[in-house]
Amino acid sequence: MKNLVLAMTMLTVLLVGTDSALAAPPGAIPVYCAGTALEGEERLLTCRRADTRAVVTPVPADMFLHITDILVNPNNVATSGVYSLVVGRDDAGEYPGLPYVDLLGEAAGSYHFSTPYLVFRNGEDIASRAVPSSQLLAIDVRASGYLASQVSP
């Protein structure tokens, strides 16, 4: 049920958008991504086209993946504690590499972030990791955005 609510939230973000979001270029393909950030290891998010559900990670040739929104939620029944996680480009290192966003939250709720654009190029993946100081060891990460053949201004 929780996954259904998260999926519906991400679909709403894709269809309704936010007032502060920049417009996608003509021909852009909506994309949604999902994964779980764990303490101690970098984990890839799986991204799919909204129209065909085809997996698009790593980013396909001649395309750019624009991440415009991130939704995070603790992956357990914890009612207290804080977490910090990093979402960014997979660089096969200990933490996601540049570009990235560093997010901080509490166990009591979900958090939605309209990010400055994170743009990933051909062959790149999006990854997440909970930092060692997190009191929660697993955080669900959902992201949305679009694939386009050009980088948006």
Image (spheres, helix red, strand yellow):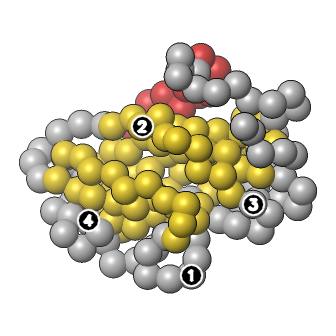
The reply to whether discs 2 and 3 touch (Cβ–Cβ < 8 Å) is: no
Q: Nearer the viewer, residue 138 or 17?
A: 17
Q: Earlier in the sequence, mark 2 or mark 4?
A: 2
C-alpha separation, residue under disc 4 versus residue under disc 3: 29 Å
C-alpha separation, residue under disc 1 versus residue under disc 3: 16 Å
Q: Earlier in the sequence, mark 1 or mark 2?
A: 1
Question: Mark 3 — residue?
Answer: 121
How packed mark 1 is, by other alpha carbons closer than 10 Å (few <14, some 14-19, many 20 or more), is: few
Q: Earlier in the sequence, mark 4 or mark 3?
A: 3
Q: Nearer the viewer, residue 99 or 17?
A: 99
Extreme residue toward the left, this view: 80
Q: Nearer the viewer, mark 1 or mark 4?
A: 1
Q: Nearer the viewer, mark 2 or mark 4?
A: 2
Q: Earlier in the sequence, mark 1 or mark 4?
A: 1
On the rendered image, what quadrant is the C terminus found in?
Answer: top right
Relative height, residue 8 to residue 35 (above, below): above
C-alpha separation, residue under disc 1 versus residue under disc 4: 20 Å
Question: Mark 1 — residue?
Answer: 92
Question: Mark 4 — residue?
Answer: 137
Residue 51 visible in the shown view: no
Is residue 89 left or right of 115 when viewed as pictured?
right
Question: Mark 2 — residue?
Answer: 113
